[in-house]
Amino acid sequence: MRYRRLGRTEWMVSEVGLALRALEGLDEAVAGAALGAAIASGVTLLLVDVREHEGGVEPLVGRVTTGERPRLVVVSRFERMAEPSTFAAQLQAAGHRLSKDGYVDVALFAQVPDAAQCAVLDTLVESRAVRAWGIETADAALATRAFKAGARVLVAPGATEPLLAAAAAEGAGVIVEGDPDSIGGALADARVTSVVAEAVGAGDVEMLARAALRG
């Protein structure tokens, strides 16, 4: 596995990351084996959907990655942002579902937080309860607004020139959602840090790793 720096953050992450959505609802042993195989292959970037009630894989991440957690970067995708009064509690709860250390590496949102929410994020980043936050969008203008507000990571469905240019201008790390067929092409652009894709077994994980090396 090869690694690239995620924008101007302190992290070097694997060129291929694992999107964990496909593991939701699977037998825990099967899901745990897929996650373990990814980590064993050198994957250090995980994309997890935050589930505030039940059915998510966040607790599985905590159990499987014990001892490995410090070298992993987990991007936690939030479907919604709480009101400013409960925003900190929402983010902290997500961190505790991931590990006993109770922190979020990257909190990912689909819209730009408002001024009050940004103030909460600034406080949590300062205390290291949240290490960074990011925006998920295909809209370069929205991405730029987020970068100006403090976002350091972009997750996008494709590596379009406007998005890559916007991210490069602000020093943001770029993560592209893809599949084995798109990994090599996306990674050919040095502005892309990593491609995240789904895998539900060790064979799928191996296919992703090979695709990265071909790139």
Image (cartoon, grey):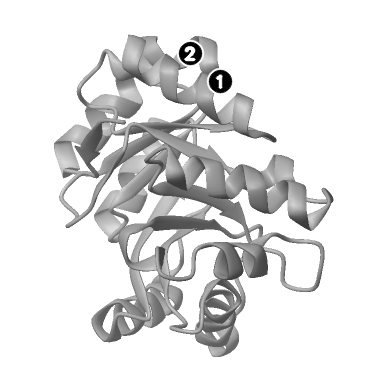
Do we see residue 160 in this rendering?
A: no
Whole-percent x, y for residue 42 in the image: 37, 40
Q: In the image, is 18 to the left or to the right of 41? A: right
Q: CA distance from mark 2 to mark 1?
A: 5 Å
Which residue does the image show at 67% across and 34% down from the upper left? Answer: 201
Whole-percent x, y for residue 146 in the image: 36, 52
Judge the density around disc 1: few (<14), some (14-19), many (≥20) Cα neighbours within 10 Å.
some
Q: Which quadrant holds residue 5?
A: top left
Q: Amino acid at mark 2?
A: Ser
- Residue identified by numbered label 1: 179
Residue 182: numbered disc: 2
Which residue does the image show at 40% across and 82% down from the upper left? Answer: 120
Q: In the figure, 84 relative to 52: above or below?
A: below
Whole-percent x, y for residue 38 in the image: 50, 41
Q: Element type at marker 2?
A: helix
The one of 38 and 17 positioned closer to us in this rendering = 38
